[in-house]
Amino acid sequence: MNLLIFTQKVDKEDDNLGFFHRWLEELAERADKVFVVANFIGKYSLPANVQVFSLGKEKKIGRIMRYINFYKYLFSALPKADAVFVHMIQIWVILAWPAAAIFKKKIYLWYTHKSVTSSLRLAEKLVAKIFTASPESCRLRSKKIMVTGHGIDTERFKPKNMLKTGALKLLSVGRITPSKDYEFILEVVSLASGNAVLDIVGEPITKADVTYKRKLEMLVLEKNLRGRVIFLGAKNQDEMQDIYNSHDILLHASETGSMDKVVLEAMSCGLPIITTSEAFKSLLAVLPKDAAVIAGKIVQTAGAGKNLALRELVIKNHNLENLIETIIANMR
């Protein structure tokens, strides 16, 4: 089976999309040939049966030229492919569909976001199937939607004994953006025990995100949390295993409505989770968004150590190998 894959970025060191490199490795194991077209290309080391093509964003190529490159690579690889797999960007489904229809190739989409846009509605009409991590991760009503679980590399993210200080180490991970509601997390920390410290892993991406980070930094000062809240910046997949394992609790208050993979990565390491996100109601006890309640839960959870039952949930429902097997089986 030959696959044509469209994705935003191929870069194993990227803090946000680096995980997709492992997806490509697993897909390559189950395919004869894989053609990957990405908007941005960074560092990668993929099997010999994978060819990677860049639309040119890393070279600052303009939007019009990137569209030209999109069709150049589409028409080059499509005749040799048995199926097309689009990761997250539904507009690429719409752009690729006329050519795919001419060559009689089915398109499959992976989508995890609570937004139901007009472009998603149109893409749903054009694809054979939409794969998603959970019922909350794709809220379009369609018989084409298949809930597969997430794809967590449970061999990378596994429990590990780490030397810890006397402080209660809290962790929050994700892009610095309003939908992650770090303001609420800071409110929780201000109410938590004085020996609790919070590390935030993530970076702002847009100008609005940068403004939001400045707001958070001001809140840290206003709430007298200097020294108790540290912004660690972006970290890649290789760095995250030790970060999860060197902390005591993951705090999660995201409003995206979808199942954040960082929570599942932390669970795979056995890290206790405190979340207010309804997306995890099938796996975890979801708490109300009340800072005092969350601060009390931190006290109850402190010192609990690794929770290996959380890891078993990820292995059973969200491990990478099972996900890729399911996707390949459906595309065949």
Image (cartoon, rainbow, N blue to C red):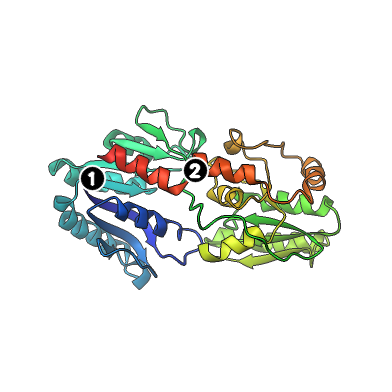
Q: Residue visible at 41% across and 43% down? A: 323
Residue 326 drawn above or below residue 15 = above
The quadrant of the picture occupied by the C terminus is top left
Q: Quadrant of residue 62?
A: bottom left
**Left or right: residue 247 compared with residue 313:** right
Q: Of label 2 and label 1, which has the lower sequence position?
A: 1
Q: Amino acid under label 2?
A: His
Crowding at dot 1, Cα within 10 Å, few <14 / some 14-19 / many 20+, comes out as: many
Which residue is rendered at x = 78% and y = 43% of the image? Answer: 297
**x and y percentages locating residue 179 in the rendered image:** 59, 48
- State the residue position of label 1: 83
State whether residue 292 is above or below residue 246: above
Bin the neighbour count of mark 2 within 10 Å (Cα to Cα): few under 14, some 14-19, many 20 and up: many
Gap between marks 2 and 1 measured at Cα: 24 Å
Q: Residue at x 43, y 38 (%)?
A: 148
Q: Answer with left or right where residue 310 lies relative to residue 258.
A: right
Measured as percent of width and height from the top left, residue 176 is found at 60, 58
- Is residue 161 shown left or right of residue 157? right
The residue indicated by pointer 2 is 318
Q: Is residue 87 above or below residue 237?
A: above
The percent position of residue 268, horizontal first and vertical second, equals 57, 50
Q: Quadrant of residue 243?
A: bottom right
Foreground pick, 95 / 102: 102
Q: Are marks 2 and 1 in contact (CB under 8 Å)?
A: no
**The disc labelled 1 sits on which kind of residue?**
Ala
**Residue 293 showing in the rendered view:** yes
**Residue extending furthest toward the right:** 194
Residue drawn at (19%, 46%), measured in percent from left and top? Answer: 82
